[in-house]
Each structure stands twice: as structure tokens, then as C-alpha cells.
Image (cartoon, rainbow, N blue to C red):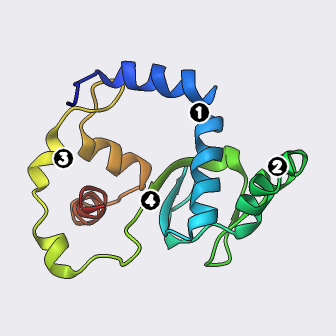
Amino acid sequence: MSVDITPQEAMRRLEQHFGSREGMLTHTLSMLSMSGQPTDITFYRRKPILDVRVSTKLGAARLYGLENRLPRLLSCIGFSNGAIADLNEIWTVNPMPMEGFSQAELDAVDLAQGENRIGPGGETLREMIRNTYHCKSRSEVDYFLRRWIAS
């Protein structure tokens, strides 16, 4: 049985469980590091990186109890495309399917879902995607919205 909760309640529960936004990001990045699942990473001040894998160093440190190395590793997180980022630069981590998307899957996405108000300040999903992916056109928003919904 699912229970509908407000975005604010969801955020409160996540912070209660992970301690902070950074704690949740660290957990998510660690899991992706261990699984090899591709992800989109969005940043506050730069373009996103798409379908990248997180360096296995992060997952290995957590797996082997080397928590004392985390601050250094989180200041220079490596990605499969060669990009490096500090945890504080990351805005969102959006896991993607292991096998990617077919064009038919992306075409089948109902973009009307983008008008749902799911943001903490009442933003629509479309507005959140436009902001976090730094979209410059409606076609870019539609593309990233399709990817996010299909994931």
C-alpha cells in the first residue's frame, strides 16, 4: 500500500534518515559507485554530465570501512567521462537504466507528467528539470524531461 506524502514531508524524512542533503548524495553516489549504474549528474554552476559512472574508489572506501578517506574522495569524485567534481558542486544525482533507453521508450513518455507540481516550493517537474539541467530551449527541456520520466 502506498501513501501519498507532500514533498516537504519527503524531504524531512530523507534528512531524518541521511542526516543532510550531503549525506543522501554521499550514500547515492556510493551505491552507484559499487553497482556501476549510469547516472546523470547536474551541477549548480555548470552543464550536467550524462550517462556517467561514478569512480569505484568511492564505493570501495565505504565497502572496506575507510570512512576516514571519504572527505578527500568527496572533494574529487571521478566519473567515467574523465570529469571530476567536488560533492558541494553537485545539485542532483539522477540514476539511469543500466541498458539505457530506446528511442521508442523515450517517444512513449507522457510529457504531461512534467506539469505535476512536485517541487518543495510548488515547482513543476518541468521547471525543476529546466533549472537543474540548465536547459536553454524547450526542446532541451523535453529531452531531459523524457529521460527523467523514463528512468
Name which of mark 2 and mark 1 comes first in the sequence: 1
Give the alpha-carbon distance from disc 1 to disc 4, as whole Å: 16 Å
Identify the element where label 3 is drawn: helix
Q: Where is residue 26 in the image (x, y as percent from the top left)?
A: 65, 46
Identify the element where label 2 is drawn: helix
Residue in the foreground of this view, choosing between 100 and 84: 100
Give the alpha-carbon distance from disc 2 to disc 1, as whole Å: 16 Å
One can see residue 44 in this view:
no
Give the alpha-carbon distance from disc 1 to disc 3, as whole Å: 24 Å
**Circle 1 residues within 10 Å: few <14, some 14–19, many ≥20:** few
- Can you tell which of label 3 and label 4 is closer to the viewer? 4
| Residues marked 4 and 2 touching at CB (< 8 Å) | no
- List the single residue furthest toward the right: 68
According to the picture, the residue beneath numbered tag 2 turns out to be: 70
Identify the element where label 1 is drawn: helix
Q: Hey, what amino acid is under mark 4?
A: Pro
The residue that appears at 51% across and 62% down in the rendered structure is: 47
The residue that appears at 24% across and 46% down in the rendered structure is: 126
Name which of mark 1 and mark 4 comes first in the sequence: 1
| Residues marked 1 and 4 touching at CB (< 8 Å) | no
**Circle 4 residues within 10 Å: few <14, some 14–19, many ≥20:** many
Give the alpha-carbon distance from disc 3 to disc 4, as whole Å: 18 Å
Give the alpha-carbon distance from disc 3 to disc 2, as whole Å: 36 Å
According to the picture, the residue beneath numbered tag 3 turns out to be: 114
Name which of mark 3 and mark 4 comes first in the sequence: 4
| Residues marked 3 and 4 touching at CB (< 8 Å) | no
Classify residue 60 by image quadrant: bottom right
Vertical order, 121 against 94 (above or below): above
- Can you tell which of label 1 and label 3 is closer to the viewer? 1
According to the picture, the residue beneath numbered tag 4 turns out to be: 95
- Can you tell which of label 3 and label 2 is closer to the viewer? 2
